[in-house]
Image (cartoon, rainbow, N blue to C red):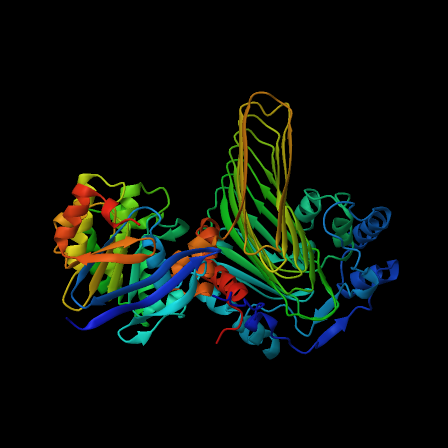
Amino acid sequence: MSEKLLEIKDLYVSAGEKEILKGMNLSIGKGEVHVIMGPNGSGKTTTANAIFNHPEYQKIKGSISLEGEDITNSKTDEIARKGVFMSFQLPEEIPGVSVTNFLKYAKNKITGKNVKIFEFKNELQKNMDELGIPKEAVDRSLNVGFSGGEKKKNEILQMLMLNPKLAILDETDSGLDVDAIRTVSKGIQMYKNENNAVLIITHNTKILKSLKVDYVHILVDGKIVKTGSAALATEIENEGYAKYKG
Amino acid sequence: MSKSQIEDINRNIYDIKNEDNYDFKMKKGLTREIIEELSKQKNEPEWMKEFRLKALDVYESLELPTWGPDISELDMNDIATYVRPKSKLNSSWDDVPEDIKKTFDQLGIPDAEKESLAGVGAQYDSEVVYHSMKEELIQQGVIYTDMETAVREYPDVVKEHFMKCVPVYDHKFVALHGAVWSGGSFVYVPKGVKVDIPLQSYFRLNSPESGQFEHTLIIVDEGASLHFIEGCSAPKYNKVNLHAGCVELYVKDNAYLRYSTIENWSKNMFNLNTKKAIVGKNAKMEWVTGSFGSKISMLYPMSILNGENAKTEFTGISFAGKGQNLDNGFKVVHNAKNTSSLVNAKSISKDGGKCTYRSLVRITPNAGGSKSSVSCESLMLDDISISDTIPVNDIETDDVIFSHEAKIGKISDKTIFYLMSRGLSEEDAKAMIVRGFAYPISKELPVEYAVEMNNLINLELEGAIG
């Protein structure tokens, strides 16, 4: 196995009174693409939020580490600065802050130094061209009035610009048409290299077709019940989760 | 995750106090003798002294407002109405006394003059200490001077306009202003003259337990245009200070005036200021206002659209922190056919601060074909802050298009989480959301002022800096 990037050990997480993750284990190495699939309510989004130490989720037990460093109780922004990114199911709208200014500011924070404007603009333009995002779109306020597809593309643009070590894509493909899914896949391929990793959380196997997936995990009732190769996703597509449920 | 504490503002440069090193400070309180002494100190013509005394009578006859924030803490017996700095009026910064010059240097006024202004006035306590304007504007007949000079040198124009737009009967603090006014600016732009670069007056109140009562009178004659900027600040003292300025704007037919203000008073200030514009046919009046600081603010700029096709726009933001009650808004009277008004008011409150948007839209029976669109939006940064909207709409004709929209919102935890997942700290995230919220106003300001406004927002949100 390649060098470890993310390691989740025996993680128990609850939201309010409700226990959601019940002994989750997950290990992601550099250069790998992982997929978590599972029925509604199995804890997929909770896993993503738990990695980012979302304040509404309480960690009861277990640990999360990134490159060997414990991040179980780190603040969300510290985790982001250590190199974790998440593409949101429902990205938030920020009126009055343009996509360009937001990205510049976020990149300054993530890298800890001021971006070089010329380089930044070139890189932004290149990524937008690849993703088919029109020029004027980055002057708009972040996510304000964006269609569902535009928001998801923008999340992928952010991933490319912020260049994290680990990108978590939470249902990034849900509700997208075929063309948009293709764009998202393209973005992932552009991002992916030997030193980073992708964790895709999805219901849908379409997005997996054009990606080289290393591991598929089936999450049921807060635990990973089966790990396999890309073939496992095809099996789920044909047969559903019935045989893994209680 | 524990919510990080947002500290109260570190106002750094704004809070630099100079020694209260005046040439003359009037004893506190308000009597006929004090007014007569003030008039004598200022060496004014008799008519102005009579005007002041008449205004004092009106002041005594009027009651405090029965609505809005409680201002009973303000005791005029504790306020010195006139503080003359140890400086005459200068036209070169080099001649301004060192301590006063240093204050304005730190506020960036002389630099701004060099870089981006056509003229500058600077008032320190009760008197203007510096005034200058570019030579080409003088040659075009533009007048920009302190109000005292205008009273002496242009008595006819001043008599015709002074406190005619804002009569002393308007309310108690206007009457007070009429009695004790001092300093301020007078601008006259002749017919057809376009002043492309802004003029700016800066008002600095240094002396504790005193009041600032500057009078600004601007006449933009037919077909002329002007952008005027007003900046205000004061250091913090434990005792209350009072600002009761008065701004009178005459925008004649086909003329254009933009009046931009960044008020950044200390939090012991009662800001009871009055601003009004009379707008002629086809003329346009634009207000851009950022209201920061002060303990209590009651400020409702007003446009009276008296000529057909007259237009006005108001773009303003208020920011209330702990212990602040900012009762601000806008008033417009549509008094001629096909006039229009557009209002975009925003407020931010945090740490128990209170912002009220109080407005009046009056459309008279002879204003058929008029349009008025009002939008006000409030943002509360926590659960203990207060935001309120009190609109009065008095529409006396059916032939109008009128809309009023009010939104009150809070910063959601989801939005903060989203931004933190992009590497922003909680404070950075809040500041970004607030700056974005204020952007429709800051984009209307000249770039240096937009920067200043963003800095003020950051200061309010981030607490101590560097």
Image x and y of residue B447, in percent? 43, 58
Image x and y of residue B242, in percent? 72, 61
Judge whether residue B117 can be spotted in this image: no
- Please state if B3 lies on the left or on the right of A203 as rendered: right
Closer to the camera in the image, A85 or B285: A85
Judge whether residue B6 can be spotted in this image: yes
User: What is the quadrant of residue B169 in the picture?
Assistant: top right
- Please state if B43 lies on the left or on the right of B397 as rendered: right
Residue displayed at 51% across by 61% down: B457
Image x and y of residue B98, in percent? 59, 79
- Please state if B462 lies on the left or on the right of B295 as rendered: left
Up-down: is B466 above or below A41?
Answer: below
Up-down: is B108 above or below A140?
Answer: below
Closer to the camera in the image, B211 or A65: A65
Closer to the camera in the image, B430 or B199: B430
Question: Which residue ends up furthest to the front in the rendered image?
Answer: A246
Question: Which residue ends up furthest to the top in the rendered image?
Answer: B398
Residue displayed at 74% across by 54% down: B177
Image x and y of residue B58, in percent? 83, 47
Closer to the camera in the image, B283 or A94: A94
